Structures are given as structure tokens and as C-alpha cells.
Image: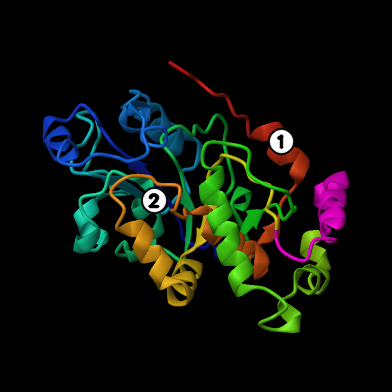
Amino acid sequence: MMIKIDFIIPWVDGSDPKWQAEFNKFTPKNKILNSESRFKDWDNLQYIFRAFEEFTPWVHKIFFITYGHLPPWLNTEHPKIVIVNHTDYIPEEYLPTFSSHPIELNLHHIKELSENFVYFNDDLFLLQKLKPEEFFINKLPVDIAILDTTHDGLIGHIVLNDIDIINKNFNRHINPRFSKKNLILNNPSKWFHPNYGLKSLQTLFLLKWKGHTGFLSNHHPQPYLKSVFEEVWNKEADILRQTSTSKFRDNQDINQYLFRYWQLITGKFTPGKYKEFVAKRKYAEVKT
């Protein structure tokens, strides 16, 4: 029996006058992390939804997160589409928010969300038919567990905050079995899987460092377990609340990657094929 797999996709229309009026009541401290392009509707959402219908007919529900505005062409009566307003699942004390981070960190509060779900951004497109096994095998997220040094990008500071939380919870001072080497070598079939090819050498070399320095990351649809969100919230509620109260993105934040890293560290994933990840999942940066 196939498990239920939901999709989640957030969207914002920065041209909405009501949204703009609320946005203008606040001022972001970090202009780089909160540039105008973060809130722009690129008029490409219809292609994403058409791809869902054409290429992933097996999806259980598509949770469409929005401030309140909706694209005029969207069939809101479609049996698979669930419209989710920020006020439907994000605690009131965190609203309004103009940061993707509170939107992501509180996904587990969405009513009727399945245990297995895939988080999309509105700049991710499916271009061919996909099977459920692309995202989940044996009820576990399909992912790549390869150590890395640091994140090269605009959100590098935020990713380092995620890594700091991982090191805080999984280290040899808490329990010897939580040392990086033990966590990895006690679960070698997931960290040194043949699917990774020579990329496993990267993990092997980085075992020299006792703390976690980072994980290989890509910008693509990310499969998650709702229970992992709940587990992390039970462990790190203070920092999650701190980020959730931030109206705009900030370098002190954490983001959704924390839940992915937690899944990797705790072995709650199925090793994917690195070559297929590279071959099938392409990234293109568009600047205006």
C-alpha cells in the first residue's frame, strides 16, 4: 500500500495592496536578505501546478500556503488543493511575517498534513514524470548524506546556525555515542553507501574534525517527516520561537535545513543516488 505523500508550496504576491500596506508598517534590518525579489510574483506558479497534475498524479494533497491572496486562475475547488492561510497554522504571536523562515519552521502545525511530505519553493519545476520513490522509500525521505565544509551563499550565516544546533544536540560531551565519528560509523550503510560513489571520500576526510562542519546541500524539493519537526521543536523551542518572531529574514535565524540535517544525523532517511541527483536536478540562477 502506497503511503500518503503531500506537497507544500508557499507563495506571496508582493503587488497585493493589502499585503503592501502591512509590509510597510515594518522595516527590515537586513536589506540584502530581504530584497524586493523575495516578494515578487514571477507569474510561473501555473506551470508548477500543471506539472504536479501531469507528472505526480499520485500526490495525496497539495497545501498551498499564502498570506491571503490567490492567483485568479487557481481552481480552489480541486479535491487535492488545500488553501492554507498564514493565520491557519502559524501562531498569532508570530504574525504578520514577511520571512520564509516562520512559514517553514511551523509547517507541522498544518491541519491534516501527512507524516510524509515534500516541501517545494515557487522556483522549483518538475519537468518529467516522477514516482513516489523519488522522494520516499520505506516511508523514509530519500536524501544524500555527504559531509561538507560550509555553505557558499547568501544564507551562509543561517546555515551555520543550523549546524550549531546540530552540534549542540549531537556531540561527544553529551554522550560518547553522539560523537560525529560514532554517529556516522555506527550507521555506515547510510553514510558510505555505494549510491554516493567517490563523494563518500568527502565524508571520510571530514571525519578528522570532531564537530559537524556542514552537509552537502542542493536547492530542490525536500522530503520531510512531520514527526522530525515535532522532535526538533521539543528539543529547541527557544531558538525556533526566536526565529518565528522575526518579521524579516535575519542572520541570527535558523531555517528548514535544520530539519533535514536532523533527519540525516538520526538516520531517518534512505540513501539516494548522487549521480542521479546531479543529473536530474538542475539549478539555474536568474538575476534581474
Residue 278: which disc?
1
The answer to whether one can see residue 141 in this image is yes
Q: Return the x and y of residue 180 as percentages of the image width and height.
A: 75, 69
Residue drawn at (58%, 36%) of the image: 153
Residue situated in front as seen by the camera: 165 or 201:
165
* Above or below 42: residue 270: below
Number of residues whose C-alpha sits closer than 10 Å to that of mark 1, classed few (under 14), some (14–19) or many (20 or more) = few
Between 163 and 286, the one lying in front of the other is 163
Specify the amino acid type for callout 2. His
Choose top left, top right, bottom left or bottom right for residue 75.
top left
Q: Label 2 vs label 1: CA separation?
A: 26 Å
Q: Is residue 141 left or right of residue 61?
A: right
Secondary structure mostly seen in the magenta stretch: helix
Please, is residue 53 above or below residue 207 in the view?
Answer: above
Image coordinates of residue 8 in percent, x first then y, are 40, 49
Q: How is the image coloured?
A: rainbow
Answer above or below: position of 95 versus 98.
Answer: below
Which mark is in front, 2 or 1?
2
Q: Secondary structure at mark 2?
A: helix
**Residue 61 drawn in magenta:** no
Q: Nearer the viewer, residue 284 or 150?
A: 150
Please tell me the numbered disc located at residue 101. Answer: 2
Q: Is residue 96 left or right of residue 275?
A: left
Q: Say whether residue 209 is magenta.
A: yes
What is the x, y in percent for residue 116?
A: 49, 61
**Left of 143 or right of it: where is 17?**
left
Residue 107, labelled with which disc? none
Give x and y (percent) for residue 221.
53, 44
Q: Is residue 106 visible?
A: no
Q: Residue at x 59, y 51 (%)?
A: 135
Task: Say which amino acid is labelled 1.
Answer: Val
